[in-house]
Image (cartoon, rainbow, N blue to C red):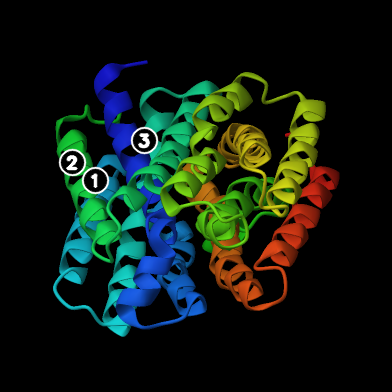
């Protein structure tokens, strides 16, 4: 890979991944500090994904028109400012509003970054590595943010990560000038051929993020583990995508492997519902992390191949469906902690949804 281009693309991937899980990593501390319930804490992530989901296709359009590096760098700046401003006022409604703003930045950063990697490096393996870095961001948030048990931790670290990423993008190489192709109207970006790819991405990335936002709370409440230990175990749900997303790029045409990944992921999520013993939880989290990363590169590279006239917008559509999954699923799974079983029922439902996705895998 070209080192400067790779660093720029990785910076654009890491910040959205980090922001997916940074609040959930210290959900109980945020709940106590703001005087709110866990369902409201879930809205911190929901607010981010309202704009993140809504702006996937528009940000893809902007990237196709003005260049991925410019759009992605602007997105990182928005995340840095919104996260830093959140530290100034400890009010739940204000924090939710700033997360809403930060979602504009994560939408721009992630979609533009995927297009930047295609334009500068251009292989399914590179897309897999790009996705791996995004997953690493979420995994590191789950593992590291609980080490600073404060309501400020998710926002201060998000601002720092975005600021460093912006510096890396600033020195990254420019993408080649894009050859203009006749482009279809906006409605045709919602292409029926993209639906199976969108479902794959939603069930792998989307549901793993939903699980990642609540796995620390599950292991802490139902399993009796400390938040620090639960964070390290739960971080595997997102962090192990570092391994499996590039592997998914290498084996993008092996449909049997992709289908099997959804079944294994479902087994891991169902295993997490047991909440103990710790060794089994580590194994279950590892299964989720490894398997959930496999479909990423096939989904993204497939979308780009299907829509060469608007590759970033096609990625935006596929990722929008996953973002809506996170948007809806995160607070719903949080609500199941108020039911008997401390969230176990919600994890079993997510496992069933993940397993059923194996039925929609298609050859691109």
Residue closer to the observer: 306 or 31: 31
* Residue at which label 2 appears: 164
Considering only order in the chain, which callout, 2 or 3, is on the residue closer to the N terminus?
A: 3
| Element type where label 2 sits in the image | helix
Q: Residue 301: in sight, yes or no?
A: yes
Residue at 69% x, 77% y is: 339
Estimate how packed mark 1 is, as few (under 14), some (14 to 19) or many (20 or more) residues with alpha carbons within 10 Å: many
Residue at 43% x, 62% y is: 52
Q: CA distance from mark 2 to mark 1?
A: 5 Å
* Residue at which label 3 appears: 116
Estimate how packed mark 3 is, as few (under 14), some (14 to 19) or many (20 or more) residues with alpha carbons within 10 Å: many
Quadrant of the drawing holding the N terminus: top left
Residue at 22% x, 78% y is: 90
Foreground disc of the pair 3, 1: 1
Q: What percent of the width, then of the height, locates residue 363?
A: 78, 33
Q: Are marks 2 and 1 in contact (CB under 8 Å)?
A: yes
* Residue at which label 1 appears: 161
């Amino acid at each position: 890979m070209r080192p400067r281009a790779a660093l720029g693309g990785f910076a654009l991937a890491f910040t959205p991944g980090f922001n997916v899980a940074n609040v959930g990593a210290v959900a109980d501390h945020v709940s106590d500090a703001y005087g709110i319930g866990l369902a409201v804490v879930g809205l911190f992530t929901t607010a981010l994904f309202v704009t993140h989901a809504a702006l996937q296709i528009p940000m893809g359009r902007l990237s196709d028109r003005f260049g991925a590096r410019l759009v992605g760098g602007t997105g990182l700046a928005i995340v840095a400012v919104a996260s830093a401003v959140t530290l100034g006022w400890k009010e739940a409604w204000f924090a939710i509003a700033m997360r809403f703003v930060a979602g504009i930045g994560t939408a721009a950063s992630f979609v533009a970054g995927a297009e930047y990697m295609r334009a500068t490096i251009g292989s399914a393996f590179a897309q897999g590595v790009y996705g791996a870095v995004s997953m690493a961001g979420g995994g590191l948030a789950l593992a590291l943010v609980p080490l600073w048990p404060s309501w400020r931790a998710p926002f201060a670290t998000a601002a720092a990560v975005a600021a460093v990423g912006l510096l890396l993008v600033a020195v990254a190489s420019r993408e080649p000038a894009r050859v203009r192709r006749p482009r279809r109207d906006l409605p045709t970006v919602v292409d029926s051929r993209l639906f199976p790819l969108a479902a794959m991405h939603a069930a792998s990335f989307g549901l793993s993020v939903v699980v990642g936002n609540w796995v620390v709370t599950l292991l802490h409440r139902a399993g009796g583990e400390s938040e620090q230990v639960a964070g390290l175990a739960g971080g595997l749900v997102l962090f192990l995508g570092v391994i499996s997303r590039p592997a998914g790029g290498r084996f993008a045409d092996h449909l049997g492997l992709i289908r099997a990944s959804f079944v294994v992921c479902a087994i891991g999520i169902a295993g997490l519902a047991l909440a103990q013993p710790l060794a089994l939880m580590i194994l279950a989290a590892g299964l989720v992390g490894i398997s959930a990363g496999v479909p990423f590169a096939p989904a993204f590279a497939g979308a780009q191949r299907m829509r060469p006239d608007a590759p970033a917008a096609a990625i935006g559509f596929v990722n929008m469906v996953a973002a809506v999954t996170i948007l809806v699923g995160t607070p719903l799974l949080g609500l199941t902690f108020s039911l008997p079983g401390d969230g176990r029922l919600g994890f079993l439902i997510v496992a069933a949804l993940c397993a059923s996705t194996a039925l929609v895998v298609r050859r691109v």
